[in-house]
Amino acid sequence: MAGKVHAFEEVVKHDQKGDCWLIISGKVYDVTPFLEEHPGGDEVLLMASGKDATDDFEDVGHSDDAREKMKEFYIGELDKSTLPVKQRNTPPSVSSTANVDSGDSSKILLYIVPLLILGVAFLLRFYSNKE
């Protein structure tokens, strides 16, 4: 099922109602004839054009029948070396991971600070009653 190899720049030009191509799992599909039939409407497909739509496709949880129907629209493979840098799947940098950790520690503080205030208030009340 080998087809033509398409550059990313070529695929993203096909993002109109009369000419709509999608990239899903490194394969290129011309879904123009399917726009009117798509159960989610043509808008969904048009919004997924011009980028790698793999995540959009997988998030919906398409049926086996839908995956089989895709074969009708297959026109080739994507030349992955032509993907823009931000489109490539790269692991997150260390700095973005550090930001996630600091977010977790601030959530912990949301619980600790009120408990400390309650503890101080309890101690003040306890010692003021003794005197």
Image (cartoon, grey):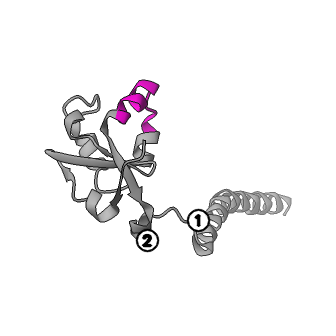
Most distant residue in the bottom direction: 95
Instruction: Give coordinates of residue 46: x percent, y percent.
Output: 24, 46
Q: Is residue 28 visible?
A: no
What residue lies at 59% left-to-right and 75% top-to-bottom?
A: 95
What residue lies at 29% left-to-right and 65% top-to-bottom?
A: 9
Q: Can you say whether 89 is above or below 20 in the image?
A: below
Q: What span is colored magenta in the figure?
A: 59-71
Asked whether residue 68 is drawn in magenta, I would say yes
Alpha carbons under labels 2 and 1: distance apart: 12 Å
| Residue 8 marker | none
Q: Residues within 10 Å of mark 2 (few under 14, many from 20)?
A: few
Q: Residues within 10 Å of mark 1 (few under 14, many from 20)?
A: few
Residue 11, quarter of picture: bottom left
Seen from the viewer's position, the closer of residues 96 and 69 is: 69
Name the main secondary structure of what is drawn in magenta.
helix
Which residue position is annotated with label 2? 85
Seen from the viewer's position, the closer of residues 99 and 27 is: 27
What residue lies at 71% left-to-right and 60% top-to-bottom?
A: 112
Secondary structure beneath label 1? loop
Amino acid, disc 1: Pro
Instruction: Give coordinates of residue 130: x percent, y percent.
Output: 86, 60
Which residue position is annotated with label 1? 91
Instruction: Give coordinates of residue 102: x percent, y percent.
Output: 63, 68
Asked whether residue 41 is drawn in magenta, I would say no
Q: Can you say whether 91 is above or below 21 in the image?
A: below
